[in-house]
Amino acid sequence: MGRRVIKRGSGKRLLDPKNFRLADEVRYIQSRAAEHDGRIVTVNQLVLFSTETGDAWLLDPSDRLAARLARDGDPEPVYVEETDTTMAVGWKGSYRIDGPAFVYSDRETGRISTILGYPLRQLGSFGVS
């Protein structure tokens, strides 16, 4: 049987999957963004990251889904529902990587944002492309 791997922070500290809650990881990465501290957290196929500019995101690289978690250090609302066996996220848009740019398409507004300066090389090692 496969083991769930959860890695957090710059030292990639392993978390206990039995005690894992996505909402806790969202709050953690939002707190890192508030401190303008760049971090990457991976949970199975999900990637959460914060940047030194105070932005934070939750990504599903397999489907290229994205939810902004913080902007300029201020937390953004995100819908996360969890049970012991399932997890649901209110994905607000999708993303793509275009060279050095992170391009986000918001489903609700239709707005497309192009953001430079994100740690795309490091994110690429976690499957973000």
Image: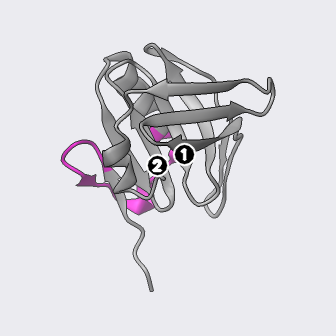
Evaluate if marks 1 and 2 touch, with contact meaning CB atoms under 8 Å apart: yes
- For this orientation, the residue located farthest to the front is 99
- Is residue 64 found left or right of 13 in the rendered image? right
Q: Residue at (31%, 47%) from the top-left corner?
A: 122
Task: Give the residue type that dot 1 points to.
Answer: Leu
Seen in the picture, residue 93 relative to 86 is either above or below; the reply is: above
Provide the residue span drawn in magenta: 8-25
- Of residues 26 and 72, the one drawn nearer to the viewer in this rendering: 72
- Count up the numbered dots: 2
Secondary structure at numbered mark 1? strand
Q: Residue at (81%, 28%) from the top-left corner?
A: 108
Quick check: is 28 in the magenta stretch? Answer: no
Seen in the picture, residue 28 relative to 86 is either above or below; the reply is: above
Q: Residue at (32%, 46%) from the top-left corner?
A: 121
Estimate the x, y position of residue 129 in percent, counting from the top left. 48, 53
- Of residues 9 and 104, the one drawn nearer to the viewer in this rendering: 104
Mark 1 residue crowding within 10 angstroms, few (<14) / some (14–19) / many (20+): many
Give the quarter of the figure containing the N terminus: bottom left
- For this orientation, the residue located farthest to the bottom is 1
Task: Give the residue type that dot 2 points to.
Answer: Val
Estimate the x, y position of residue 40 in percent, counting from the top left. 35, 42
State whether residue 23 appears in this view. no
State whether residue 106 appears in this view. yes
The residue beneath circle 1 is 59
Q: Can you tell which mark lies on residue 47?
A: 2
Q: Disc 1 and disc 2: Cα gap in Å?
A: 5 Å
Occupied quadrant, residue 72? top left
- Of residues 43 and 115, the one drawn nearer to the viewer in this rendering: 115
Mark 2 residue crowding within 10 angstroms, few (<14) / some (14–19) / many (20+): many
- Is residue 102 found left or right of 83 in the rendered image? left
